[in-house]
Amino acid sequence: MVYDVIVSGLGPAGCALLKGLEGSGLKVLALEKEEFPRRKPCAGGLTLKAYKEIKLLFPEVDRVIRVASKELELYYFNKEVSISFPSHFVYLTDRAELDNFLFNSVLSLDFKVHTGEALLGAEYEGDLIKVSSTKDSYKCRVLISAEGVNSKLSSLFKVKRELGFTYEADLECSWNEKVLIDFSKFKWGYYWLFPKGDFITVGVGEFKDRELFKRLKGLLNELNRKHGLKGKVISERGYPIPAGRRENDVYRERVLFLGDAGGLVDPLTGEGIYYAVKSGLIAGNFIKEAFNKGDFSLLSGYKKEVNEEFGKEFYWARMVGRLFFPLRGINFRLLEKSKELSLLAGKLLSGEISYKRGFFEYAKRAPRALIGI
Ligand SMILES: Cc1cc2nc3c(=O)[nH]c(=O)nc-3n(C[C@H](O)[C@H](O)[C@H](O)COP(=O)(O)OP(=O)(O)OC[C@H]3O[C@@H](n4cnc5c(N)ncnc54)[C@H](O)[C@@H]3O)c2cc1C
């Protein structure tokens, strides 16, 4: 049997794609190497924009929201800025629970799903693509890589991605509902504490300083001590993370790369769930159109749209980073002094406003705030 579409990986990107293909009548096979629930190193934070997008697709998502927060504390060495939002700015999940929920939500769709089966390779055979897995081999017309940052297909097709590195731990620890971010000691990265109810997720991530990649575990312990955190470690792990660019390498002939497999992660905050879900939906629309019109060349439009929608945002995220990271001392003084600027920073982090708008609004207001210092 020849499948219309084979999807490899059922994280947020793969699940969103299946949801997007619901009712299309296409013959779809999804391969997922793990059994659910499975762990994926991730802080599990959904920004407001990600939460809204997921809720539209999966209205029951509130079942796996552990904490919704209105409070943010930002640190840079001994400087501290607290931001209180009028409404929730971030929704915290346990990724094992979120992904299990997404997976179970797509199981009822009319597609074949094989768990515990990993894709191993793929090659073109005329108009078809032959896929081999740990259990069998299959043929399809369109192949989707939604395999995350360690994607087999991304290596096979030499997809160009920029990678940073993280080290993360879940700790048994009682905490309030505040989200804490500390920018001390990084070149282009941060420490985070995300509350999850009966535990917390703490982690450090760095995109630029490769020397720091090797010292992330020690840095996590150091920053945990700084913030007075003790508690039994439930799990801990280092993991790569992509950094999205203006032009993202997400397409080969009839092969589409979604989410982390295509490098679609905010290069400033490391937010990737939103881009995984959105890329799944965008890919779904192009696939349906290509099959309806019998024209697979239309699939290349996926890359164009991804770069139009996300590439520009990633470009401006990097511009904001260039304005923020080298001048953290001054920026923290501005944030301490100006409620207007700290709220603007919060809106940027929650995805409420675009980086481009945030960049210009910050640049416009900062000199006035600076004079007031
Ligand atoms: C430490 C850390 C913290 C993060 N925190 C956040 C955060 O708070 N908020 C946020 O938005 N983003 C965060 N991110 C980014 C986010 O985790 C990813 O961007 C997101 O998981 C991408 O989703 P995805 O569906 O593309 O890939 P994944 O979630 O990685 O899913 C890929 C799936 O493919 C499967 N798979 C892999 N290889 C194969 C194969 N060969 N065959 C079959 N199946 C395969 C995997 O088992 C997995 O189920 C964080 C990342 C890290 C590393």
Image (spheres, rainbow, N blue to C red):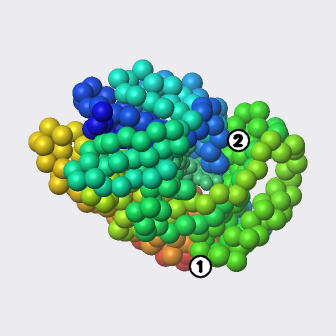
Q: Quadrant of the N terminus?
A: top left
Name the residue rendered at 13%, 43% in the picture: 294
Callout 2–callout 1 Cβ contact below 8 Å: no
Q: For the residue marked with disc 2, what is the amino acid? A: Pro
**Residue 162 placement (x, y as % from top left):** 50, 69
Question: Left or right: 330 with respect to 265?
Answer: right
Tell me the residue that label 1 is attached to.
326
Q: For the residue marked with disc 1, what is the amino acid? A: Pro
The residue sitting at the top extreme is 108
Determine the CA span between mark 2 and mark 1.
29 Å
Q: Earlier in the sequence, mark 2 or mark 1?
A: 2
**Residue 110 placement (x, y as % from top left):** 35, 23
The local secondary structure at tag 1 comes to: helix
Q: Is residue 21 above or below residue 77?
A: above
Q: Give the numbered dot on residue 195.
A: 2
Q: Is residue 104 above or below residue 337?
A: above
The local secondary structure at tag 2 comes to: strand
Residue situated in front as seen by the camera: 336 or 300: 300
